[in-house]
Amino acid sequence: MQQPEASNATSLSLIDQARHRDPDAWRRLCQIYAPLVYSWVRKSGVPENDAADVVQETFRIVSVHLERFRHDRPDDTFRGWLITITRTEVLGYFRRRGKQLAVGEGGSSAMLRMQNAPEGNAVDADSQGWQDESTEAEIMRRAAELVRQDFEPHTWQAFWRSVVEGHDVADIAADLHMTPNAIRQAKFRILTRLRETLGEW
């Protein structure tokens, strides 16, 4: 059975949909961002056997307060807001256990970075030393896989071969029995959906 085309997709971003209590949007939001939060938690020194609990509590707080997130200024990013909540939960984890970060698991410098970071939406994950290219790539991969489900296979193939693999539009059109204009429309629809899904990314 073919998958439905997403030609009439809502213009709301995934975050906005989740803010309006759309359960599918919330599921997708968690699927995309949970690996990022998990990586932050682990890099802060939380042991592996406790990391999942800290991630779960972080997303519980996000679900309760998502309506408060605002994007009024250029530096108001969802990732900044999310890292602020994650940092708070990580600090709470160590306070509850009366522990200091072990040097081998991120060191006291990681704790200091969290404690000294500014409050609010505009906490830059890069400044925490919690970001790396592999995590970013994984988020993009997860988002792409979620978006892919909303499009016909040939539409996705046209987009992928054109945008990712860089093939000539005329060659793609001939191989897939599509017009060049249909290839351009496929690119536009999928890129639009990716931007809506990832928002600030």
Image (cartoon, helix red, strand yellow):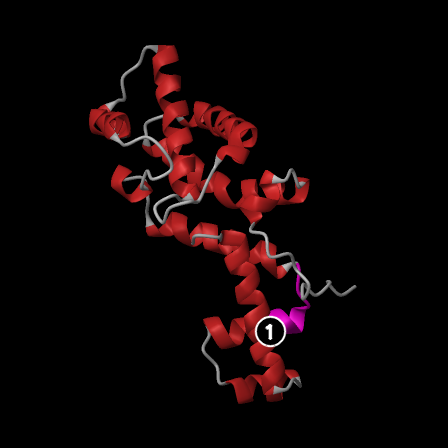
Seen at 66% across and 41% down, the residue is 22
Disc 1 crowd rating (10 Å Cα; few below 14, some 14-19, many 20+) is many
Residue 194 x/y as whole percent: 53, 59
Q: Secondary structure at mark 1?
A: helix
Q: Residue at x 49, y 55 (%)?
A: 141
Closer to us: 50 or 143: 143
Residue 153 lies in magenta, yes or no? Answer: yes
Left or right position of 66 against 182: left
Q: Amino acid at mark 1?
A: Ala
Question: Bounds of the magenta span?
Answer: 150-157
Q: Quadrant of residue 118?
A: top left
Question: How far from the left and from the top, in percent, is residue 13?
Answer: 55, 51
Q: Looking at the image, is 178 positioned above or below residue 80?
A: below
Instruction: Tell me if residue 34 is in the magenta stretch.
Output: no
Q: Quadrant of residue 46?
A: top left
Can you give x and y, in whole percent of width and height, for residue 159 in the image?
55, 72
Q: Main secondary structure of the magenta part?
A: helix
Q: Residue furthest front?
A: 72
Q: In the depicted view, which residue is nearer to us: 83 or 121?
A: 121
Residue beneath label 1, please?
186
Compared with 26, 87 (above or below) is above
User: For the C terminus, which image quadrant?
Assistant: bottom left
Q: Is residue 89 left or right of residue 53?
A: left
Query: Could you say where residue 109 lies in the image, as x and y percent from the top left?
Result: 20, 28
Q: Nearer the viewer, residue 164 or 113?
A: 113
